[in-house]
Each structure stands twice: as C-alpha cells, then as structure tokens.
Image (cartoon, grey):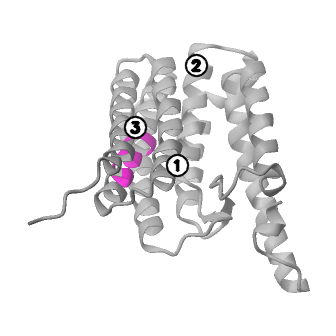
Amino acid sequence: MKKRRPLRVFIPNTITLTNLAMGSLATMEAWNGRFALAALYILISAVLDFFDGFAARMLKAYSDIGKQLDSLADLVSFGVAPAAIAAGLLKLEGANGYYVYLIPLLLPVFSAIRLAKFNTETSSDTHFSGMPVPADAAAFAALALIHDFPGISMIDSVLLHPVFIISLIILNSWLMITPLPMFSFKLKSYRPTANRWRYLFAGIALLLIILLKGIGLFSTFLLYVLASIGMNIRLRYGKGNGEKTSEEQLN
C-alpha cells in the first residue's frame, strides 16, 4: 500500500500553481494591450514565488513534483509573460518586422536555461549564479507600468524606445546565464542583524515604487543589478585578501 502524502505538501504546490495562473493571465493581458494588468499579475506571481518556498520550508513539505512545478510556473510568469510585454511594447512604439516577435523570444529561452542551471547546480544561501528570472520580469513589468502610467516624460521616452527595449532583452538574457553572483533574498532567519542589507534593500525598493511607480520599479531593478555587481567585487576582493566571503559579507 502506497504511503499517502501529507496534506501539507499540497499547500506550497497550490501556491505555485496560482503563480502559474497569474503568469498566464499576465501573458493574456499583455497580448491584449492591458500592460498595467499584466504588470500587476507578474508582481503577484513574484510574491507567490516567494511564499511557495517559504511555505515549503515552514511546513517541511518538500517534494520532487513541487520543484518541477516551481520551475514551470516561473518560466511562464517570469519568462513568457515578460516576452509578451516586450513584444507588445515594441509593436506599440512603432517597431516593425519579424524581430518584434523573435527578439522577445530570447527571454523565455534564456529563462529556461537559467532555471535548468538553478535546478542542477548547488545553490547558495547568500547569492545566485546569474540573475534570477523574477528580477528580469520586474524590469519588463516596470516598462509596462511606465507605458500605462507615464511619469517623467524624458525618462519614459528613453525607457520605452524600441532600441532600449531590445537592448534590455539582450542584456537580461545574458545576465540570466552569466556566472556573475547576484545576491539572494532567501531568509534563513528573521533577525534584523542577519538580514540588514536585505531589509534595507526592500525598504528602499518599496519607497521608490510608492513615489515613482513604474520608474521606481525599474530603479529597483537597476539597484539590484548594481548591488549584485558590488557584491561580486567584494567577494573577489575578499578572496584575494583573506577576508570572509560567506553570509557575513552580506550582513
């Protein structure tokens, strides 16, 4: 007789499937030109992506199927949905030709590679190897919000220009598969002293988004990339000078 799985296993899996549903809705809304709704669904997916792992750790409800579902959901929510936003924005901003659809396809392709690498490599509690797919999705969700809720016209015109969007697609595709260490938001504890940089980053990000909306979200994306580059320099410097390079460097 097969051993029945405990009910708690289905709680994180249900959260993961809801993440996938939100990503699917984001894709549909982007194709219909409702970019703000697409961005909202992506942001909800990002929250759910955090809480499914949190629920699995709290309930000790790990499962092989949950791991596979998580990657599939992330591919839809943070790979396919941002590509739909990018393609829609390129078309609306006057871009023409086959590249309007082909270039955005880089996002789900490289997201799939990034997720496969994550599933097969030894993970770290302090950093990721390459940019996590939710960070890429946040950048394109920001562009979607900027399109529907214009802020500073000069900045908006630059961020929504087809050349910038294409450049961002290529840059993010590279960042997702590069071995560059980028810091992780995984929490091993809730102690402020153990997570002060993470809490500081979250506070700054929230303030930027409240004050600047889409531009604030895009600024948060840039801040994350720059902070991770700074962390990478610190890690390399520490290794070359005998300094600690583990969690203590981030705290």
Q: Nearer the viewer, mark 2 or mark 3?
A: 3
Q: Which residues are magenta?
A: 70-78
Mark 1 and mark 2 in contact? Answer it, CB < 8 Å.
no
Q: Label 1 belongs to which residue? A: 54
Residue at figure coordinates x 46%, y 35% from the top left: 45
Q: Which quadrant is home to the N terminus?
A: bottom left
At mark 3, the secondary structure is helix
Percent coordinates x, y for residue 194 in the rendering: 79, 57
Residue 147 - label: 2
Along the horizontal axis of the image, is 39 left or right of 109?
right
Badge 3 crowding class, 10 Å Cα cut-off, few under 14, some 14 to 19, many 20 or more, is: many
Percent coordinates x, y for residue 230 in the rendering: 82, 60
Q: Label 3 belongs to which residue? A: 19
Residue at figure coordinates x 38%, y 34% from the top left: 23
Amino acid beneath label 3: Asn
Q: Is residue 17 above or below residue 206?
A: below
Q: Is residue 3 above or below residue 97?
A: below
Amino acid beneath label 2: His
Q: Which quadrant is home to the C terminus?
A: bottom right
